[in-house]
Amino acid sequence: MGSAAAGLSVDAQVTLLLAGDGVAPLEALVGQLMSPGNEQRGQAEQLFNHCKANHPDALVVKMVHALQVSQQMEVRAMVAILLRKLITKDDVSLWPQLSPVTQTAVKGQLLLCVQREEGKSICKKLCDTVAELAAGILEEGMWPELLPFMFQCVSSDSMRQRESALLMFAQLAQYIGPQLRAYLPTLHTIFQQCLSADASSDVRIAALRATTNFVQTLETAVERESFQDLLPGMLQTLSLALNNGEEAAAQEALEMFIEVAGTEPRFLRCRLVEVVGNMLQIAEAEELEEGTRHLAVEFLITLAEARERAPGMMRKLPQFIGRLFVILMKMLLDIEDDPQWHFAESEEEDAGETADYEVGQECLDRLAISLGGNTVLPVAFQLLPSFVNDSDWKKRHAALIALAQIAEGCSKVMTRNLASVVSMILSLFRDAHARVRWAAINAIGQLSTDLGPDLQQEYHQQVLPALVAAMDDFQNPRVQAHAAAAILNFSESCTPEILTPYLDGVITKLLVLLQNGKRMVQEGALTALASVADSAQAHFQKYYDTVMPYLKSILVNANDKQTRMLRAKSMECISLVGMAVGKEKFRDDAKYVMEVLMTLQGVHMEDDDPTISYMLQAWARLCKCLGQEFLPYMSVVMPPLLRSAQLKPDVTITDADSEDEGNESDDQSVETITIGDKKIGIRTSVLEEKATACNMLCCYVDELKEGFYPWIDQVAPILVPLLKFYFHEEVRKAAVSAMPELLRSGKLAVEKGQAQGRDDAYVKQLVDFIIPPLVEAMHKEPETEICSSMLDALNECIQIAGPLLDAAQIKSMVEEFKQVITASSTRKKERAERTQTEDFDAEEGELLEEENEQEEEVFDQVGECLGSLLKTFKVAFLPYFEELIPYITPMLGKERTPEERRVAICIFDDVAEQCRDASIKYYDMFLPYLLEACSDTSPDVRQAAVYGIGVCAEFGGAKFKPILGDALARLNAVVTQPTALSAENIMATDNAVSALGKICEHQRDSIDGSQVVPAWLGCLPLKGDLVEAKIVHEQLCSMVERQDGQLLGPNHQYLSKIISVFAEVLSAGTDLVTEQTAARMVSLLRRLQQTLPPESLASTWSTLQPQQQATLQSILSTPSS
């Protein structure tokens, strides 16, 4: 379509393009579509889109014709891509709009093209088009000719045709796996032949792709096993490619093996030793390209990580971990001593590190996390000492880096071997080589995070002085800066008690670095100071007057591009120091600092300026420190914060298999995820700023309560939709946390008359705006941990909203609880199935336990939500409770975890307590479980059970009588067992005593009071469960006031016990008793003093402890008010 055509009308251009048999006009158009010039390309796109919209049949037919007759390779390639987009990829595919005649023609012609095309890359593109079109229409039986054609090609003499058929089989595996079930034996034979050494290299690789894709669609173990004898051919394909020097093909093959390792690791099990052995050899072969070796390592790590599908399989392999560890350690030696690193002018800590080094580092971390410390640490301990003592600095450096990388995955086992690990690292703090010293500090920093707080408690005397000494290394600013950073890691898991004795030394040193260091060192010192202040809290007060002037001076003077990070860190440090020392000490400086921040806020900043994010956080900390005094600044703070919270994610979406080489940039700030057949690239810096802003909004509403009211109407519509912001977990977490806070702020503002004439109707609007989206988001939430936070937030919302919740909202919550319980049970069942696999071992058991703990949290939160609903709606909630019974009762089963049993019992306890008479009809269903649970091995379950028995004794009336004897015996067993008063049992014991008290109070006529009441008195006072203690001691007081005969006993023989209980309770202040009950006890004691004969008073007195006598003496000698 040359420039002459451009002068024609659109219709004339269309006629020229689509009429007749020639393809020259189309070739010209395609050339323009590929043109670099925007104007030319734009005109061509307009014409192409016009044809697409108005003449789809003619356009598609013409394109297929061009594929057959055009002599220009690049035109055929481009047409193949355009055609695929047109008929399969576009938002609205053209295929359904084409006439049946065109559809039939296109299908036939495409297969002819596949058969005839000689160009390898064009042929691949044609196969893609056929496979994608087939994926959409084959299942409806709309392309019956395709499978016979593929089977014909795959047995053809032409290697190109075989390759094409295999490529189509590979792509279609996931779509038409079920339809090909009948052909499995045939496919098996075909794959075997095409994997053989006689086939061409291209055919073998295509056959490998088809085989690996099919294996991933096979549903039963039997089907998978029938394909396992293809493994030798698959491995041979890889080794032939390597032996023939075809590394690109070998890399393709390795990528396919990695896929199988990730999705069907057990397919490899029958030849695991051979497969793993081959991969280790490739990883060890230094003559191969780096990329090839890295893929072999990636395969091995992926196999180790495939725990869900093949738990424990890799731990069983002898020597595997030892060899892999040596390979990874060798990769860590690939590091250059780059002068840039020593100059420390730039942030680049990784100067001199190679791709090899980075892979080694990352894979050590993944290996330790997937296999655990019991497996990895012994191997490390065998190898690392020789590295630590080597004369080559690179080996000493590698040992330290390795320790830091495996710490997270080996944390439990490493904590048990801390002495040897810490001494190994500290011995290198004085190494001759600066990079080794840096790595030693780095290792301590990492271990402080991964092994805290054990490391801090046991080794602070060795570690802190070593870090302080490292800050004196003025020759090596990067080492100094890293020592300051490690102080940050160390102090994060450190109590003020451990830190305080070292504060003088640490702070003095950090102030020296602030004044004398390079910029990087100053930044490190600021971060460390901030962290130390945060950990030391009030202990930091004595340094405040020395430190704050330095910080303010940096804030004001660091204002060029080089020092903007320094300024940002000074904001962080000032705000954390302010929070540590408190409002009274900080107030005057806070005002000054806020003036500076307000000025800065008006200055235009570049997008990558860290000041913005640091400023958002500093404002929020200043608010936390100053509380309501911060309100005047809100009008300054909120506008930029709202802007940041509303940032749209910077997202690019491409086809996962598109070869847009141009977009594959090494942009560190873009994260790529693949979902289905789409590749999504997200700019992380935008997301981080958005997450920070959302977290800060949450801080403000939490801190200011009703003071935040003026902003609710702006903030709620921003945060509610973010409950489903799946690009970034932190954003979702912040949105979740903010929901109850926003509701509380609105409700308090109405209650305190600060909401400009708004009333409960406004709170109801807020409830309706917040709760339904929260419930809906829970339904779609992929992360168990966030689901648990959502339930926690919902529980708070229920408590705040109370009776404002309507029936539809309650119904939707209950439906969601069913869904959550079911989903959680399903996940647990899947994990339980993993325990049945052949390689499951103790290490896997530990990892599973951690995953299940997360589920416990979910059940716990559901129980809390139901408790809140019952407290709010009481009997009105029972119809919903009945719907939930089938979901709750299975949780009482013996095979369930203690936490599930506890939650289920607590739900019934709440029903019995809140619904009283109306709940009696459920006693028969639940009480047998409660009685049995009194002897459960878990003290938490026992506590819930005995508490429930007490509630039923109080409200159950005659319905409780038949089980009284059993209940007394079981409660008595809890109270009298030898370890009843141990720390872990005391709560269950106190609740059992309380339940006995309720039986004495409400079921006295059905028991032998002369036995039970004194036995109950003998268990007092209660000192573990402070809530029950107050209730029980109040009950005791009432029984004495009404002169309960069975309590006082014949001839008042239990009076001395009662008085000693009173004395002990009163001497504990208000821990064990309310003020009102204490006053009643004192007046009872006074009355006894006046009414008892002196001799019985004296004998009672003599039985008391000296401490109790002194308490009583002081109480009774104080004149009554």
Image: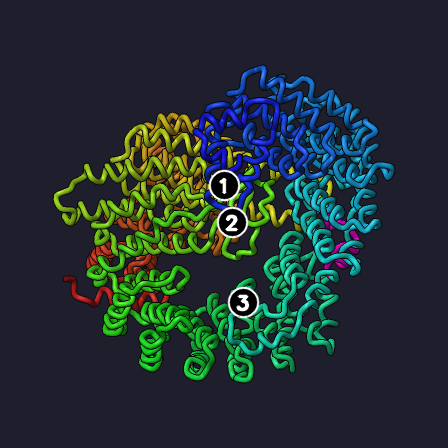
Residue 603 relative to residue 116: left or right: left
**Pair 1/3: label in front:** 1
Q: Position of residue 259 (x, y in %)?
A: 68, 42
Whichever of labels 3 and 2 marks the residue nearer the N terminus, that label is 3
The residue located at (56%, 66%) in the rendering is 446
Mark 2 — residue? 977
Looking at the image, can residue 631 be seen? yes
- Depth check, front residue: 1117 or 977: 977
Graded by Cα atoms within 10 Å as few (under 14), some (14 to 19) or many (20 or more), the crowding at tag 3 reads many
Whichever of labels 1 and 2 marks the residue nearer the N terminus, that label is 1
Looking at the image, can residue 1053 be seen? no
Residue 41's label in the rendered image is: 1
Graded by Cα atoms within 10 Å as few (under 14), some (14 to 19) or many (20 or more), the crowding at tag 1 reads some
**Pair 3/2: label in front:** 3
Placement of 29 over or under 478, stated as above or below: above
As measured in the structure, the alpha-carbon distance from the residue carrying label 1 to the one carrying label 3 is 58 Å
Badge 3 vs badge 2, beta-carbon distance below 8 Å: no
The residue located at (40%, 73%) in the rendering is 563
Mark 3 — residue? 448
Callout 3 secondary element? helix
Question: For the view shown, which residue lies furthest in the top direction?
Answer: 101
Query: Looking at numbered disc 3 in the image, what kind of residue is underneath it?
Result: Ser
Query: Looking at numbered disc 2 in the image, what kind of residue is underneath it?
Result: Gln
The quadrant the C terminus occupies is: bottom left
Whichever of labels 1 and 3 marks the residue nearer the N terminus, that label is 1
Residue segment shown in magenta = 314-325
Badge 1 vs badge 3, beta-carbon distance below 8 Å: no
As measured in the structure, the alpha-carbon distance from the residue carrying label 3 to the one carrying label 2 is 42 Å
